[in-house]
Amino acid sequence: MKIRRPILATSIALLAALAPFAPAAEEPKPLPAIKVDAAPLPEGGGRYSFAPVVEKVSPSVVTIATSKLQRRNANKNPYFNDPMFRRYFGLPDEDNGDEDSPKPPKGGGGKKRLERAGLGSGVVVAADGYILTNNHVIDGADEIIVTIGKDKHEYKATKIGNDPATDVAVLKIDATNLPAVIFADSDKTRVGDVVIAVGNPFGLTQTVTMGIVSALGRKGIERGVSSGATHYEDFIQTDASINPGNSGGALVDAEGRLIGINTAIFSMSGGNQGIGFAVPGNLARGVMESLIKTGKVSRGFLGVALQPLSEDLAKQFKMDGTNGALVAEVTGKSPAEKAGLQSGDVVVEVGGKKVEGPTELQMTIASMAPGTKAELKVIRDGKDKQFTVELGERPGDKGLAAAQPPKATDPDVLDGVTVADIDAETRKQYELPEGTKGVVIANIDPDSPSAEAGLKVGDVIMEANREPVTTAKQAVDLSEKLKKEKKVLLRVSTKGASRYVVVERKE
């Protein structure tokens, strides 16, 4: 087997001295008095009427009306303007800068003024005026009005904070002795539990619908947030009717305790089709407390790139099943690296809680505060290992460039793959991050096993069968050793993001 290479292949003492001059840290704001009833629902004992539950919950559910500064726009119906549902009705976003969006007629625009932009729902969670709702309900609003109670008293609300990643927002109104909802422990919610949704669909205040919990842990739901943003999703799915205007309303259990904030629907028509989603109450409460206390959401950070386990990968890493999160890469100087985690480890438990896959691990770590010491159970080479990781604070998400590097020629190495050493020229040519180690794929036969496994030009092979690959010559030597292997485990980096790939050779 041949290979052709492309041509040119603060010190503590200083900090201590400056400490007296550092500004005093802001004291965290005190949290409101929130009621939580963590007991699970009793077994059996059906009801003939849920009127007592509705009477208990309804006073805590409010109407949220948002207004935006905009030019006069005739024939606007705010009841159909819940931002989450605009895409279902084919309506453009206002003032979005889109050249194809309708523009006011010349000479008729005039000055902007506050106009009703949307209607949604919210839930009173503390007697002194704290309200939970969805971020998309109040996003971009210049004025937020909360209507509460049978007398429909209106309050101008202040936005305390919002978190697009979970679609949660916190409002505050100047009021006292409000009827606050009681939280349940949403982690104890079960598929099949009876649930009641309370909200204001289409502006019809205090509308109640009933259903059951259809599924738990739903992910990948389109919520109108930036596709490049990190989403923390663990939705409760229900068949209780959720329609435009329900967003931000309450999903409660048969005891009237809050288990979720209604957020979205899956619909082909824009109306309810029996598939609705709610942010779990525990997740919403954690975000709310962080926003109130510090003005931001601080999430735990492990510092690993993860991927799910396929059956092939599970066999390669000596796993009995596909449950767990495979560590594809450990970030340098991260909490994970300091604790001793390595690529190829499979995280199966955090704090005694089973990890089914990468999403569960990400959600669990993100729900922990920075500085928390997380106990991780890891499978390494088929053996159990325990690690204690002191979590850092998650940094901002960074996008990755998606430019395709130019293709090289002469496929030959590793069954149709041509590789090259990484030097200054290839680093620039293939836009490789600094510090990338391995050999870069300069060309790949589209009919090769490696291409079928998803490898592309510009990918960097870092390991083959758990053995590091550092030079093209070493890749040639390894390819000779791997000729008799039916399956080869490669560790590959794409634009700095690592993953494991099983390449199965053709017969």
Image (spheres, rainbow, N blue to C red):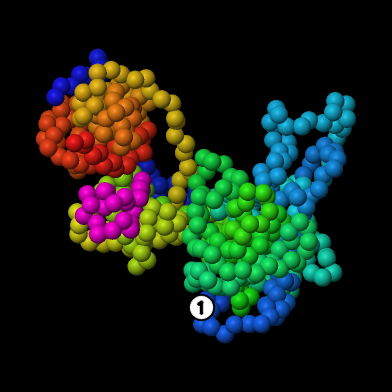
Please give the name of the residue rendered at 31% of the width and 56% of the height, measured from the top-left corner: 322
Q: Is residue 66 above or below residue 198?
A: above
Magenta span includes 111: no
Which range of residues does the magenta coloring cover? 304-325
The image quadrant of residue 436 is top left
The furthest residue to the bottom: 45
Please give the name of the residue rendered at 29% of the width and 61% of the height, measured from the top-left corner: 377
Magenta span includes 314: yes
Q: Number of marks in the image? A: 1
Name the residue beneath numbered marker 1: 40
Q: Position of residue 495 (x, y in %)?
A: 37, 33
Image quarter of the C terminus: top left
Instruction: Examine the rendering and report whether any part of residue 419 can be seen.
Output: no
Q: Position of residue 489 (x, y in %)?
A: 23, 42
Please give the name of the residue rendered at 21% of the width and 35% of the height, measured from the top-left corner: 506
Residue nearest the viewer, comparing 409 with 429: 409
**Left or right side of 357 for 5:** left
Q: Is residue 22 above or below residue 190?
A: above
**Left or right side of 241 for 325:** left
**Left or right side of 216 for 224:** right
Q: Is residue 287 above or below residue 419?
A: below
